[in-house]
Image (cartoon, helix red, strand yellow):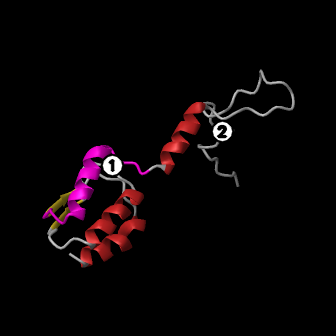
């Protein structure tokens, strides 16, 4: 039975393969700057428009919103956890909009907890 080939590995994908033909023997290639840049981005609290996102969070802290619209921020679970923490303290919010984001099932318990306080 043939084994499945992982298309993401650098061995099978020439675009991901590091060029080692010009390196002296016994030295390892350094990762590309693009890889390091992408790795650093993954660790940050990533949203599409950080300034607008922070303004909405401050309005949530002040309990000044009835509609919390986070549509189109492309936020991940870490940013959504921050939103959930603010929502728990709000009493005026009646609607929460989270369309066009990159949320996973892992944020659901936090969302349910936040929504139950509304």
The location of residue 107, given as percent across then percent down, is 39, 66
Residue 49: x %, y % from top left: 30, 43
Q: Residue furthest top?
A: 22
Report whether 50 appears left or right of 59.
right
Which stretch is magenta? Answer: 45-66
The reply to whether discs 1 and 2 touch (Cβ–Cβ < 8 Å) is no
The residue drawn where x is 28% and y is 45% is 51
102 is higher (above) or lower (below) than 82: above
Magenta stretch encompasses residue 95? no
Q: Which residue is mark 2?
A: 10
Residue 56, above or below 115: above
Whether 59 is among the magenta residues is yes
Q: Quadrant of the N terminus?
A: bottom right
**Quarter of the picture holding the C terminus:** bottom left
Residue 112 location (% of width, % of height): 31, 74
> Residue 105 occupies which quadrant of the picture?
bottom left
Q: Residue at x 77, y 23 (%)?
A: 21
Helix, strand or loop status at disc 2: loop
Is 44 placed above or below 32 here? below
Q: Nearer the viewer, residue 88 or 63?
A: 63
**Residue to which mark 1 is pinned:** 74
Q: CA distance from mark 1 to mark 2?
A: 29 Å
Neighbor class of circle 2 (other Cα within 10 Å; few <14, some 14-19, many 20+) is few
**Among the two numbered marks 1 and 2 on one chain, the one whose residue lies closer to the N terminus:** 2
**Residue pictured at 18% horizontal, 66% vertical:** 63
């Amino acid at each position: 039975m043939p084994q499945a080939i992982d298309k993401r590995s650098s061995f099978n994908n020439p675009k991901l393969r590091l060029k080692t033909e010009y390196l002296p023997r016994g030295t390892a290639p350094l990762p590309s700057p693009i890889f390091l840049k992408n790795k650093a981005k993954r660790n940050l609290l990533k949203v599409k428009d950080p300034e607008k996102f922070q303004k909405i969070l401050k309005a949530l802290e002040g309990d000044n919103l009835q509609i919390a619209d986070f549509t189109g921020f492309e936020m991940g679970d870490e940013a959504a956890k921050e939103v959930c923490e603010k929502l728990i303290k709000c009493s005026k919010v009646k609607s929460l909009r989270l369309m066009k984001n990159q949320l996973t099932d892992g944020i659901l318990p936090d969302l349910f907890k936040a929504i139950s306080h509304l």
